[in-house]
Amino acid sequence: MIYHPNPERYDSAHFRRVGRSGLKLPVISFGLWHNFGDATPLDTQKSILFKAFDLGITHFDLANNYGPPAGSAEINFGHILKQDLAAYRDELIISSKAGWNMWPGPYGRGGGSKKALLSSLDQSLSRLGIDYVDIFYSHRFDAETPLEETADALAQAVRQGKALYVGVSSYSGNKTREIAALLKERQVPLLINQPSYNLFNRWIEKDLLAASHEVGAGIIAFTPLAQGLLTNKYLNGIPQDSRVNRPGGDPLRPEHLKEENIERARALNEIAKRRGQSLAQLALAWVLRDPRVTSALIGASSARQVEENVAALDDLTFSREELAEIDRYAVEGGVNLWEKPSHEELV
């Protein structure tokens, strides 16, 4: 069956400009971290992606190691792109990243070297079946590689026409300032920073939001739902079919589901109910309350979840009283799996 997008997909879509660039991203973007590996039927993947596009989501975020197995999310997205979305390529923002373990040997272990980043980008383009990505990220700060070399690699990707823009993920505020200055010397602006950010993980508020704003970069927040902790999934205990019960099946760990986190999630859920929202919708709206946050990056295992998450855009405003009440429960929950790479060599 030939896919025909919703002709009204942009009528109520929301976009924000990325930092000081001319690019706009949908306020909710879609990430293919989970559920787009080989274990998920391709028809299921299509139904999710088509629903996202039909709702005005134009940004699809990948990385070299997304799956499982690593690389399969790019292969599967590339297949769907070629078969169903090729005619709409100019409406899409496709991003990928490199920095974590991917292939055997010293160059496939990630990091920020020119060899690792540019080899990975070539592999990603091959898997995706496209000539360029719209955004290419350094997926993590690498203390073992001079930041000048990482900047060289990102700038070379742009000069070669293999990426239109470049970004970083899980960089601290100071490292964001440094990489932005190095890229500016190479006449390539830093477009965007992608950190983990949610109600139980507010580290970017200390400096990263300010740093990104200073250098003219946008922020796209990943894990805005704390890997499902900020949904109704765990409010009444851990479901038997949850990925957290499967070895290696979920980055959310049993210790993240400690009782104090669950109790805070329940309290936040009560606030969401009063707002006429689900807990997930409240969590997304809260992340987007700051205009310096360009977009929130969601994942989904069904088209229905995409619809629910996008409905968060129906109410992005909060009263002072609501924000003050939320602050009572929006405290550090020990769910930041990326704390170490984000905070290495902060000075």
Image (cartoon, rainbow, N blue to C red):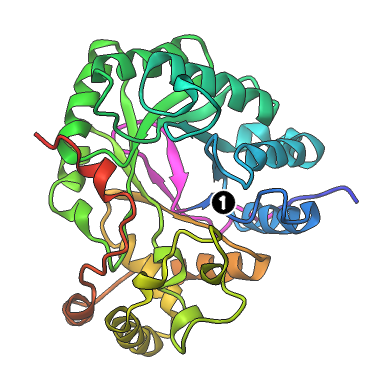
Q: Residues within 10 Å of mark 1 (few under 14, many from 20)?
A: many
Residue 14 colored in magenta in the image: yes
Residue at image point 20% right, 47% down: 209
Instruction: For residue 232, say whether it is visible.
Output: no
Q: Which residues are magenta?
A: 8-28
Q: Position of residue 261 (x, y in %)?
A: 30, 78
Q: Position of residue 271 (x, y in %)?
A: 32, 86
Residue at image point 46% right, 76% down: 231
- Residue 248 to residue 323: above or below: above
Residue at image point 25% right, 15% down: 148
**Three-letter code, disc 1:** Ile
Residue at image point 80% right, 50% down: 4
Residue in the foreground of this view, choosing between 73 and 21: 73
Classify residue 153 as left or right of residue 324.
right
| Quarter of the figure with residue 156 | top left
Residue 214 colored in magenta in the image: no
Q: Position of residue 317 (x, y in %)?
A: 31, 71
Disc 1: which residue: 57
Residue in the foreground of this view, choosing between 300 and 309: 300
Residue in the foreground of this view, choosing between 53 and 110: 110
- Residue 181 to residue 204: above or below: above
